Image (spheres, rainbow, N blue to C red):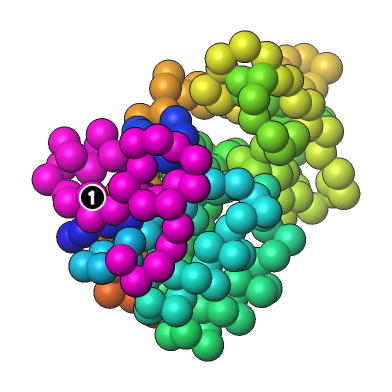
């Protein structure tokens, strides 16, 4: 498989490192400002011999990038977060151009296992009204979206499975260089249960994005990371 990396920031560099370690060819690196990128824009030259594009750019750039990539009928992994309000437009582009797209609020495989654990825990708590629920997340000071896309996904999982809840308070902290920590708590007058995922670095996100690129390579349509995880670990 040959990939194009769209966006050569910290995540783009991490994707390149993991791709090289796994024998995946990086056919092009596209970034309008980064000095070491191979191309400045998405065009016929930068898309040549590419099987799948991996986008880690900015929320307001995703749809524009998708429009350009779709012209060359390339499948795409969107690791950029904070663009979910444009999902319907993305679906329309994907359907019209007959390509495949997979997106996620977080491509870490560990986080997506964490989602499954939260789902199962929430189903149990749904039947025990003594417990209330809360969450908080911590990220580095340069992260733009707050709360994170991962936090929003966790909140939706909790609301789907704890029927008495209409809102889950989810606090956000932005400081220093924290790669990402998410905590969900179930609290009663007698005790507290906490579930926690802590990212050590960006490697997990890059590994998940590479796995997603391999998964989407020959597919058509719009998918979320849940579709891939359901194949990987099963969906009861």
Which quadrant holds the N terminus? bottom left
| Residue 229 is a magenta residue | no
**Residue sitting at 47 percent across and 24 percent down?**
199
Residue 37, picture quadrant: top left
* Residue 125 showing in the rendered view: no
The image shows residue 43, relative to residue 136, as above or below, that is below
**Residue sitting at 51 percent across and 78 percent down?**
94
- Apparent side of residue 230 relative to residue 150 in the rendered image (left or right): left
| Residue 39 image point, x, y percent | 36, 52
Q: Which residue is mark 1?
A: 26
The image shows residue 84, relative to residue 150, as above or below, that is below
Q: Nearer the viewer, residue 89 or 155?
A: 89
**Residue sitting at 50 percent across and 40 percent down?**
33
User: Circle 1 sits in a helix, a strand or a loop, which is it?
Assistant: strand
Q: Nearer the viewer, residue 195 or 73?
A: 73
- Apparent side of residue 148 relative to residue 187 in the rendered image (left or right): left
Q: Which residues are magenta?
A: 16-45
**Residue sitting at 17 percent across and 51 percent down?**
25
Disc count in the image? 1
| Residue 147 image point, x, y percent | 74, 36
């Amino acid at each position: 498989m040959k990939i194009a990396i769209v966006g050569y920031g910290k995540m783009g560099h991490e994707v390149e490192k993991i791709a090289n370690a796994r024998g995946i060819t990086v056919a092009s690196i596209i970034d309008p400002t980064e000095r070491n990128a191979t191309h400045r824009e998405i065009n016929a030259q930068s898309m040549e011999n590419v099987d799948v594009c991996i986008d880690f750019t900015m929320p307001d750039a995703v749809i524009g990038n998708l429009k350009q990539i779709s012209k060359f009928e390339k499948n795409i992994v969107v690791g950029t977060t904070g663009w979910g309000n444009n999902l319907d437009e993305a679906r329309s582009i994907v359907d019209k151009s007959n390509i495949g797209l997979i997106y996620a609020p977080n491509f870490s495989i560990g986080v997506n296992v964490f989602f499954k654990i939260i789902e199962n825990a929430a189903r149990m708590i749904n039947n025990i009204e003594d417990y209330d629920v809360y969450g908080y997340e911590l990220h580095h000071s340069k992260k733009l979206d707050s709360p994170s896309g991962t936090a929003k996904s966790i909140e939706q999982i909790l609301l789907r499975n704890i029927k008495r809840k209409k809102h889950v308070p989810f606090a956000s902290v932005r400081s220093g260089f924290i790669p990402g920590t998410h905590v969900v708590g179930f609290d009663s007058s007698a005790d507290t249960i906490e579930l926690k995922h802590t990212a050590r670095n960006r490697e997990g996100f890059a590994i998940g994005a590479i796995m997603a690129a391999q998964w989407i390579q020959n597919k058509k349509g719009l998918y979320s990371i849940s579709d891939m995880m359901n194949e990987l670990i099963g969906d009861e």
